[in-house]
Amino acid sequence: MFMKGGVVVNRKVATWWQVGVMVAMLALPFAALALTNPTVPAGISGRAVTLSEIEDIIRLIAQFLILISVVIAVIVIIWGGIVWMTAGGSDDRAKLGKGIILKGIFGAAVVLGVGVILQTLASVVTRQFLQ
């Protein structure tokens, strides 16, 4: 238990509250997607699926996963900054915060690299790479 702004706060409750807020923030992109109204091409039932339709579906899924991953990476970087700022002179906490930030940056770089690789593969498969 500790005092914060004149109120006694349990550390476990505060930690779980922060985790809950982070999880709620992750739901924001889903809410934005729910507001969009995708259009379905007319006459889609009963005909064969084409390669371009499969490519479009894979591209949409990949873009969605990259978006979610970048949002998570940004949250991790912000969390690392908060840990670093609240270190209060503790070298261990400052080191922990720096490590969290570096891991968030590394994660974002990996996700964006995967996005570039997926875009390149998609253009090679559809034969639009050298046009």
Image: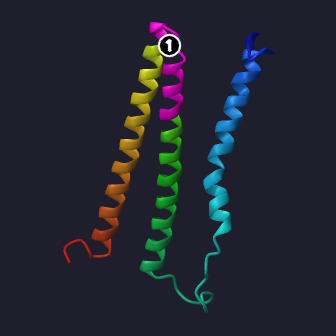
| Left or right of residue 92: residue 29 | right
| Range covered by the magenta-colored residues | 77-93
Give coordinates of residue 53: x percent, y percent.
48, 78
Which residue is most to the bottom?
43
| Left or right of residue 111: residue 28 | right
Instruction: Residue 129: name its quadrant.
Output: bottom left
Where 27 falls versus 14 (above or below)?
A: below
Element at label 1: helix
How many numbered callouts? 1
Residue at x-position 37% and y-position 36%: 106
Give the amino acid at mark 1.
Answer: Arg
Give coordinates of residue 67: x percent, y percent.
50, 54
Residue at x-position 69% and y-position 23%: 15
Query: Which residue is more in the foreground, 110 or 105?
Result: 105
Which residue is most to the front?
6
Query: Which residue is more in the foreground, 17 or 49?
Result: 17
Magenta segment, prevailing SS (helix, strand or loop): helix
Query: Which residue is more in the foreground, 120 or 46?
Result: 120
Where 47 falls versus 25 (above or below)?
A: below
Give coordinates of residue 40: x percent, y percent.
61, 82
